[in-house]
Image (tube, coloured by chain):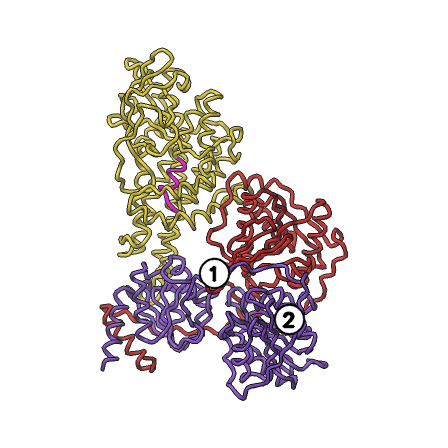
Chain colours: A purple, B red, C yellow
Amino acid sequence: MDWGNCKDILVFLEQKEGKVVNVSLEALTPARTLAGLTGGKVLALAVGTDNAAAAEKAAPLCDGVLSVEGAAFSDGCSDAMVCALEAMVNKYAPAAVLAGNTPLGRELTARLDARKGLGSVQDATALKIDNGTPVWTVPLYGGTVLNDVVVDTLPVVATVRSGAFSKPEAGEAAPVTAEAVEVPADAIKTKVVEAVKEISESVNLEEAKVIVTGGRGMGSQENFALVEELAQLLGGVVGATRPAIEEGWVSRAHQVGQSGKIVSPALYIACGVSGATQHVSGMTGSGYVVAINKDEDAPIFDVADVGIVGDVMKVLPAMIEEIRKRKAE
Amino acid sequence: MEILVCLKQVPDDSVEIHLKPGTEEVNLDGVTPVVNAFDTYALEMATRLKEAVGGSITAITVGPEKARDAVKTCLAVGANQGYVISDPTFEDADTLGRSKILAAAIRKLEADAGKPFDLIFCGREATDRASGQLGPQLAEALGTGVIVDLVDIEQTDAGICAKQETEEGYRKVESALPCVVTVNKPAYDPRYPTIKSKMAARKMAIPVLSAADLDSVEPGKPTAHVVKVFEPAKRQAGVKINEETAAESAIKAVDMMAAAKLL
Amino acid sequence: MSYLISEAAQDLLGDVKDFCENEVKEPCKEFDRSGEWPKEIYDQAIEMQLQTLEVPEEYGGPGLSRVDVAALFEEMAKADAGFATTISASGLGMKPVLIAGNEAQKKHACQLIMDGGFGAFCLTEPGAGSDASAGKTTAVKDGDSYILNGRKCFITNGGVASFYCVTAMTDKSAGVKGMSMFFIEAGTPGLSTGHEEDKMGIRTSNTCDVVLDDCRIPASDLLGAEGQGFTIAMKTLDQARAWMGCIATGIAQRAMEEAIAYGKERVQFGKPILKNQALQFKVADMAIKIETARQMVAHTLTLMDQGLPCSKESAIAKCYASDIAMEVASEAIQMFGGYGYSREYPVEKLLRDAKIFQIFEGTNEVQRIVVANNTIGKF
């Protein structure tokens, strides 16, 4: 691939209340691969009202942090953020622009593409270099089919799936450069008037080593408590399928699957989960899968290392008791 | 309120799609084309808004002529009229190209009707590619604002107020009109067509607009290309435990987890 | 194979299938257990206007052929036979009006259906089942009114209908020639519902007594003329029977589909049980019976559409379809083995649902009388 004069790789650091989101940091890893190809730097772009925390987090993981600060760049103000992103792309002429495949990451890259006539890939799960050309793997049809795609325009634009890349090792803190971007008044077309936090718990499914997930088969909120008990016992995080969330047994912060989180813990225990594609596509990266279901033919058993055929309400308490006993020993 | 809903016909997403064995060809044999689920949510939200504030809904799609079925489906559940934008030169268009085609079609429909669309609805993504690009790119092509991932919407004096889902809760976002919005799964389900609305929709004409009907639309060359189509490596199914009692099964499973050094 | 239907009906079939799969099939399992009438499901069905399928086009209906409608009913029956029975019994309740009513009466009854109401047909009485002429309900003319007294039983939709078509004796001395047919709207003073049946099957349909206690209705609500009641009732049943055959066929189709799916999955002796020709033949016999029943229903409905006589065909369709529904459901249970007998699996319900189709709207013995009479003739 002919990179022309484009060398640097720009990674958009998405923030929530001043905290950088994980997938943005993970995106620094494929960025490093690309920089190796172009001979450029990995530049992390923070756009917000106060970038101090995000810059500090990203600096040891990249070659330079660009910090665009201003009152206009508050959470949810995508109109202003896309201006900042566009301005930095114009100024640094990067070879690639990466972001996490979050609603904001997708929106900003889509709008950048439209403004500059660029191609892009979304939700990339892997990056290979083939003869000097970056090849991205993206899922189709909910993940049952994969495409390897080459972006033909420069800069190459991509959003990456959460959990698909691991964060780079920390090195020395790179310098932080303040950049000023003026946002023209007519560029702001939408306005956030209220932000409501309904879910206060912080659920870190992406980084969990153990996840215990409950599905529709748990039957009730009271029964679902067993899932929580096992998760706690194993020092893990509670996951849930969409039906369990729609029943109101847990908040949607716990959702594993296509419309929730893509996870890859060392141990994944699925309780009363049938194994619909939408769910399975979010957990096939797990190291070791244990499934409990009374239906012998449940598709979840096709991806389980250990499948227990039985009533989850009988198996789970027995399992909790057994593990507790061994821990005590 | 003049409302436009953009939709895409996709393979039925309740069916697991795979490749034809030994090929790079996606096997869509026997898979019914349906309206993209998120587009049906968008139409339902649009229809509820129309029922609340009055107005009219136009449904359009860019695709082959047989995408008419998708439009017809929409005419039975809220859309008042529908169009298919179809042209051999549009076949290769990627999302960016389709956003330009849609923008040209919108300008054409607005000119014909002598009034602009106030609000343009899209699904947050299509279930086949899930790129989520079309809505924002269409807004850029039209020069309007965009709000993504709505779960609810209401009319205000100044335009609209949208409820946007976030990981921790939601935001209320306001915009003047015209505006593009993309819709996530709201708290309600799309309605079923009634016998009457379905029969009426069957009788409605769905005009096809070609490139010649639009004003100088240049979808541009595709901006990316696929080099390989394949299926993810399958996880191997392991052992199944089905002992006499639940307790015995549980102990056996715990043994295995312990042996794998996971406890 | 299935019914040969119009493009419009194919379109509707997709919607009805979606609706039944998503909203009827699974929830009705639970309602089958509880015996509760699933009002929410029926509200949704009414919103979709499923109860209007049989309303003639001139009164606001969709203008489908009867075979078109049969394909839709079969889809409902596959999801839940009780659900399909409720919807089709509404058509049954409307039939006496369409057969004998005047223009105003037809318009009125159809409008009640179009507005989301169900109909109910009230012929059977505790002492008058197969022998409908033994009915004791009376209607006495009083000026511009009739006053009705009596008790009807086993009335499908009895507790949920918007209107009732009721037979009553206007002249007890004249036997069946003294029977008349009346249209009574729900809410008329003197009409009430009594004992609700706790049924073996089709538990998602409502079946109860309808009690008439000095129920006064305008004389203009007489359908046809005095003394025509029995004829109207028999014509009604002639038409309605084919629909019961249609629903019974749907039960059988579901049973076969469940049996095939299970037979492909269930492994015994190292292979799916359906690899055994003995079971393949069972399935073949199911298919032969189902297809024969379905085409008999279709033929009868086509005759009806063309206004041709179809008493015999209708009786054959109902009798045959319900007999084979029992057979197919029973064989499906057999293929499931022990699981087939378990309430956790879907097939035992089908047997319970199928049984009533050999009994109501004329027992299969009565159907055989009809067939015999129409075949042998008077001698």
Q: CA distance from mark 2 to mark 1?
A: 26 Å
Read off the chain for label 1.
A
Label 2: few (<14), some (14–19) or many (≥20) C-alpha neighbours in 10 Å: many
Is residue C111 a member of the stretch shown in magenta? Answer: no
Identify which residue, A93 or A309, lies in the foreground. A93
Give the amino acid at mark 2: Ala
Q: Quadrant of the C terminus of chain B?
A: bottom left
State which quadrant residue B253 falls in. bottom left
Region of the chain picked out in magenta, as a range: C79-88
Read off the chain for label 2.
A
Identify which residue, A59 or A230, lies in the foreground. A59
Q: Identify the mark at residue A84; answer none if there is no mark.
A: 2
Q: Position of residue C4 (x, y in %)?
A: 51, 42
Q: Position of residue C33 (x, y in %)?
A: 29, 47
Residue C313 appears in the figure: no
Q: Position of residue C203 (x, y in %)?
A: 31, 42
Q: What residue is disc 1 on?
A: A196
Overall secondary structure of the magenta section: helix
Q: Identify the mark at residue A24; answer none if there is no mark.
A: none
Identify which residue, B225 or A254, lies in the foreground. A254
Q: Position of residue C179 (x, y in %)?
A: 33, 18
Give the amino acid at mark 1: Val
Residue for point 53% across, 64% down: A141
- Contact (Cβ within 8 Å) of mark 2 with mark 1: no
